[in-house]
Image (spheres, helix red, strand yellow):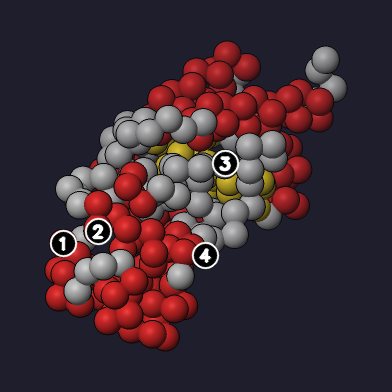
Amino acid sequence: MDLANLFRDVQLSKTEVTVLQYIQTNPELCLSQGIRNVAEQCYSNPSSLVRLAKKLKFSGWLELVYFIKFNITLPKLDVTNDIDFMNIQPPERLEPLLHRLQNERILIHGSGFSQLIAQYIYNKFLVIGINASLALWPDYEILEQKNAAKFDSIWIISKSGRSSSALSWLNALKDKDTELICFTGDYQSPLAQAANTAFIIHDPQKYDDDIYWSNPFFGYCILGFEHLLKLWFHQKQIP
């Protein structure tokens, strides 16, 4: 992860970038030897380092160091990569999902860029005769009030798995007997953890919530979905 990209909304001086790079390379030294040593190594002073932490919206120096250590230097162990771009969790849920697909009433939701993937899945389901609906409404509870018929499963697409829209739907679905399927880039996200079946799609730009940088995530979503359909056709013995 490029620190300059992560903090791109903040104007950083060369010295400040040097400090951040030093933390990224030596987080344990920063914690054990303290702020004065880091300031000396980076030709700065402790007060400037504290101001840098505040500038980046951290409560203090230690919070900045821990953030970089656990979110950048020691990134979460990914379950996907550019070759194995999709991981299904738990894998044993895939077969039953494929068996149910033809007979379910499915509601698909995505917001922002994820809406494009939701639209794609919805259109493809219509083509192959799956009973699907597309929900662009951000509030599931209001949508539920407008629909008398119950949905068998809800498919949510969310890159981060923790967007306000995804969390709102998760909260509304709590304690409801509805199967939840998701496509997300973070296997540790609230959405992935709550889903009955989670399709974890490789996302090399996990911190890019604005979708600013080039990212294959949404393309991988379509590839992953098409692979799912291939398995479904194979199960139905359709060439």
**Disc 1 to disc 4, how far (Cα)?**
23 Å
Task: State the residue at coordinates (69%, 40%).
Answer: 84
Residue 23 occupies quadrant: bottom left
Find residue 35 and report its horizontal and vertical position in percent: 29, 80
Q: How dense is the environment of label 3, judged by Cα within 10 Å: few (below 14), some, or many (20 and up)?
A: many
Q: Which amino acid does label 1 sit on?
A: Lys
Q: Earlier in the sequence, mark 2 or mark 3?
A: 2
The label nearer to you, 3 versus 4, is 4
| Disc 1/disc 2 C-alpha distance (Å) | 10 Å
Q: Mark 2 and mark 1 in contact (Cβ < 8 Å)?
A: yes
In the image, taking residue 106 as reference, residue 50 lies left or right, namely left
Residue for point 59% across, 54% down: 78
Q: What residue type is labelled 2?
A: Glu
Label disc, if present, on residue 201 of the rendered structure: 3
- Residue 96 is left or right of residue 137, and the answer is right
Helix, strand, or loop for circle 4? loop
What number is the disc on residue 55?
Answer: 1
Rendered location of residue 229, percent (x, y): 68, 26
Q: Do the residues labelled 1 and 4 touch (CB within 8 Å)?
A: no
User: First in sequence: mark 1 or mark 3?
Assistant: 1
Of the image marks 2 and 4, the number of the one nearer the N terminus:
2
Q: Return the mark for residue 16.
A: 2
Q: Is mark 1 on a helix, strand or loop?
A: helix
